[in-house]
Amino acid sequence: MHDARRTRLVLILLLIVAVALITLDFRDGGSSPAHRVGAAVFGPVERLAGGVTSPMVSLFHTVSGNDSAEIAALQKQNDQLRAQLADSQLDKQEAAQLSQLLPLTTQHHYRIVAATVIAAGGAYSDTVTLNAGSRDGIAPNETVLNGDGLVGTVTATTATTATVLLATDARSTVGIRISDTNQIGALSGTGDSMATAQELRLTLFSATAPLSPGQTVVTFGSVGGRPYVPGVPVGEVTTVTSQPGSLTQTAMVRPFADFTGLGVVGVVTSR
């Protein structure tokens, strides 16, 4: 009991002295002898208290002081690195798609302007916008393809952009031939949804020509190569849907091009 009372008395006295010294030091702008006296009196006490409280102070700095700012900076740097990695992967994908276009310039003697899809059409049309236009030599009614096959045809241009009607659009009709039999027909889009893989509808003009799943369909070609140049792979027959007694044959064709993941494409500007 006596020790506890003595301790409380000492603390009260130290508090009174501290208030007095602080008041004197404040009035003198920090140059008062009270500043040195306070350091001499309370220095040992401060060091003792500091030894006890320093772990808590360190924890506080870690959570809310300079360390938190450093953590935030590291987090920001980590986010930037992740973004750069994503950009790098996208560049690699586009480079791979571009490299698929290069053989077309020598194998088919196409003059191709490479462009990237920058926007997609609305819910009622299967169209995309390219980041190249008339200033790059692109004009309406020109074939658009990628390294896999036919993509569509240019319908409109500005100086820096081009609008492409995809082969999957219900308004699209492409003259085709079966690669192994040379039988001709027409291919039209179903226009279901750009968000899902689509099949194309084939009408073969001959009612007796061989038609079976696995056959490859290529473009027949238009006069002057516009809107479609000949020989571009389009897709593969998946299902024959002809009805008995029909004057023509019908089938469904799975396109080679992935219309849900278009990136780099080529516009055939001349042949």
Image (spheres, helix red, strand yellow):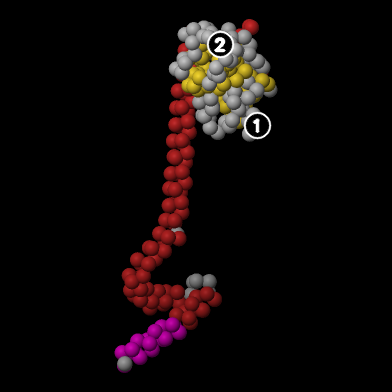
Q: 229 or 253, which is in the foreground?
A: 253
Residue 110 seen: no
Which quadrant holds residue 45?
bottom left
The quadrant in which the C terminus is found is top right
Residue 62 seen: yes
**Residue 120 relative to residue 106: left or right:** right
Residue 109, x across and y down, in percent? 53, 7
Is residue 14 highlighted in magenta? yes
Q: 63 or 141, which is in the foreground?
A: 141
Task: For label 2, count other residues whose C-alpha is less than 10 Å away and answer few (under 14), some (14-19) or many (20+).
Answer: some
| Amino acid under disc 1 | Tyr
Residue designated by label 1: 124
Tag shown at residue 207: 2
Which quadrant holds residue 245?
top right
**Residue 53 relative to residue 73: left or right:** left
Q: 2 or 235, which is in the foreground?
A: 235
Q: Residue at coordinates 53% horizontally, 25% vertically from top-left?
A: 199
Image height of 183 relative to 258, above or below: above
Residue 59, x across and y down, in percent? 38, 63
Q: Residue at coordinates 47% horizontally, 46% vertically from top-left?
A: 76
- SS for callout 2: loop
Image height of 210 relative to 9, above or below: above
Question: How many callouts does the rendering have?
Answer: 2
- SS for callout 1: loop
In the image, farthest residue toward the bottom:
2
Is residue 90 highlighted in magenta? no
Question: How far apart, in angstroms, are the residues tagged by discs 1 and 2?
Answer: 33 Å
Q: Earlier in the sequence, mark 1 or mark 2?
A: 1
The quadrant in which the N terminus is found is bottom left
Write the start and end of the magenta stretch as one range: 2-17
Residue 85, x across and y down, in percent? 44, 35
